[in-house]
Image (tube, rainbow, N blue to C red):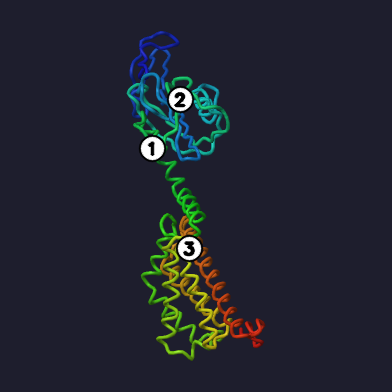
Amino acid sequence: MNQKTRQFCPQCKTAIKLKIEEDRERDYCPECDRIFYDNPLPVVSAVIVNDNREVLLVLRDREPHEGIWCLPSGFVELKETIQEAVIRETKEETGVAGRVVRLLDSQSYYDEFYGDLIWVTFEVEHVSGKIKAGDDAREVGFFPITDLPELAFSSNTKAINRYLDLHRDLWKMQDSYLAFEGGDATSSGGMLSDSLFDIIIRDADIITLNWVSEVTTHPTTKSYAMDAHDKVYDKGLKVVVKFASWISHPRDEQKDIWKYFKKIGKKRFKHGYRLPEVVSALSLVRKHIFAHVLAEWQTWKNPLEIYTSMEFMTRVNLFFDRANYQITKGFEKAIIKAGKNKDNIIPGEEQN
């Protein structure tokens, strides 16, 4: 069904000749002095993807490409827009009443059967209607968008790849968020921010040294300045190591981590530290983790990278909030055991 060659003028029935016009050979009627301009046929397709990231395909029931899967597709009729055409074709072939979301792709396309085409593909939302094979379709069904059967038209493949390009980062964020929710922000693997935690493991020594420089000079952590440098370093490095352990272990294996921080609270009380100093020192560890990792990361160029950074900061905050709680709990138990009043947890002298 290739585009037909014109033999006679439709007006006067004179035999058609060929004439060069605008550097192209065109049909010409010498009697009417008329040049015939032939244009590509407009075709529309719909990319409909469900919540399982499966794309709706139809199995062609006629030539060309009979028995091969493709997107719901068809020619634009007279007196209808391309948006109206894709909604109509989708309904006729799949039973789906849809809504155009956006233009995905347009391209010139040559088909041995139909000739020159302009192929326009839209992303379409499934609004209503039971999915069933209709006009020109032997079967209809959803297929995983990353594992599709052979498609009849390369324009379909190009449009689906374009859809993937538009949604890939969003899906990564969704998957990472689900892993975050299901894994209680721990258990590395499956979250976008996992790669940032690799920086902590790699640069634990640098982070700790930066922390030591500040904690031994900061006005809210004066007791740390009286300790030997090596002892202060060991304190900070153990916190960083515990943090890395928290990230790499599932929830049911984390009891020892929280016991460690409770024990730290008790030890710091016995060694004469004030609770605000201990809490401030831990907050400074968090600060230097943020500062170092985000300086190394240096990537805030697109939504995926911004999400990754925000997810990382959320996970860090969750850890240190709980660590602070356990330290305070251990400190308080040490006070009770020592027979002192709980009011002594926060000394009267206020530190800024």
- Establish if 275 lies above or below 166: below
* Type of the residue with mark 3: Phe
Q: Which residue is mark 3?
A: 312
Q: Secondary structure at mark 1?
A: helix
Q: Which residue is mark 1?
A: 158
CA neighbours of label 3 inside 10 A, class few (<14), some (14 to 19), many (20+): many
* Type of the residue with mark 2: Gly
| Residue farthest top in this picture | 13
* Type of the residue with mark 1: Lys
Q: State which tag comes first along the sequence, 1 or 3.
A: 1
Query: Residue 218's x, y, as percent?
Result: 53, 85
Q: State which tag comes first along the sequence, 3 or 2.
A: 2
CA neighbours of label 2 inside 10 A, class few (<14), some (14 to 19), many (20+): many
Nearer mark to the viewer, of 3 and 2? 3
Q: Secondary structure at mark 3?
A: helix
| Residue farthest bottom in this picture | 226
Q: Which residue is mark 2?
A: 74
